[in-house]
């Protein structure tokens, strides 16, 4: 009976030791992931600031094909709420000068239905009510995160080119 108790105790100690080692390894990995996440957030902030300086906005067309997840810059320059990251295509179109809407629609259609890159220049009314010139490039993009369940796999950039057009 003593032999069984000793074997059980030894097995229990080995199991408990292995469990402690796994927990320590898990905690270390968790700390590394938290640090990496903090670094990514800091880098994302720098990228957002750089985009603001360059006059660049980004978006991802959502799988419903009726809305986009827009960057803060894009929402701000076009007068959308900065607290909501989703903008409907209809709301975006409402900012585009009516004469330029067919060109925008054709590029959007090409990107979505033909799954290829599309580039378009158009005029839109900004947050202050001024008409500005924009260049947009959109198309299939592997950079859309696979875990983003709403993303439609199409993303793009928008650039305010008013100063370039006026010179």
Image (cartoon, rainbow, N blue to C red):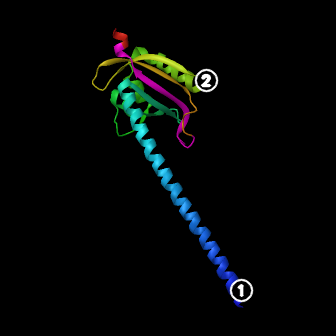
- How far across and how far down the image is residue 8, in percent? 68, 81
Q: Give residue 15's position: percent from left, percent from top.
A: 63, 72
Quarter-of-image position of residue 144: top right
160 part of magenta stretch? yes
Which callout, 2 or 1, points to the residue nearer the camera?
A: 1
Could you tell which of marks 2 and 1 lies nearer the N-terminus?
A: 1
Q: Where's the N terminus, which quadrant?
A: bottom right
Most foreground residue, 142 or 84: 142
Q: Residue at x 56, y 68 (%)?
A: 20
SS label for mark 2: loop
Q: Residues within 10 Å of mark 2 (few under 14, many from 20)?
A: few
Residue 78 visible in this rendered orientation of the protein: no
Residue 77: x %, y % from top left: 34, 27
The magenta stretch is 146-163
Residue at the image position 61 percent from the left and 23 percent from the top: 114
Of helix, strand and loop, which one carries label 1?
helix
Residue 80, percent from left and from top: 35, 32
Q: State if disc 1 and disc 2 touch (CB < 8 Å).
A: no
Question: Left of 106 or right of it: where is 159?
Answer: left
User: Relative to 61, does residue 100 appear above or below in the rendering?
Assistant: above
The dot on residue 4 is: 1
User: At 51% from the left edge and 30% from the top edge, which residue is drawn?
Assistant: 155
Looking at the image, residue 34 sits to the left or right of residue 129; the answer is right
39 or 89, which lies in front?
39
Res. 114 mark: 2
C-alpha distance separating marks 2 and 1: 71 Å
* Residue 9 is inside the magenta segment: no
Query: Which residue occupies the extreme bottom position in the image?
Result: 1
| Residue at the spot 28% in from the left edge and 22% down from the top edge | 129
């Amino acid at each position: 009976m003593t032999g069984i108790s000793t074997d059980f105790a030894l097995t229990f100690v080995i199991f408990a030791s292995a469990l402690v080692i796994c927990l320590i390894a898990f905690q270390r990995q968790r700390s590394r992931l938290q640090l990496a996440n903090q670094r990514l957030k800091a880098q994302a902030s720098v990228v957002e600031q750089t985009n603001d300086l360059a006059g660049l906005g980004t978006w991802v067309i959502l799988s419903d094909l009726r809305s986009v997840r827009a960057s803060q810059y894009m929402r701000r320059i076009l007068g959308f709420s900065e607290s909501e990251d989703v903008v409907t295509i209809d709301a975006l179109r409402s900012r585009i000068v009516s004469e330029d809407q067919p060109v925008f629609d054709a590029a959007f259609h090409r990107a979505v239905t033909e799954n290829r890159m599309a580039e378009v220049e158009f005029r839109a009314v900004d947050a202050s009510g001024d008409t500005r010139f924009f260049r947009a490039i959109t198309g299939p993009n592997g950079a859309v995160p696979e875990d983003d369940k709403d993303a439609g796999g199409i993303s793009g950039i928008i650039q305010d080119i008013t100063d370039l057009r006026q010179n």
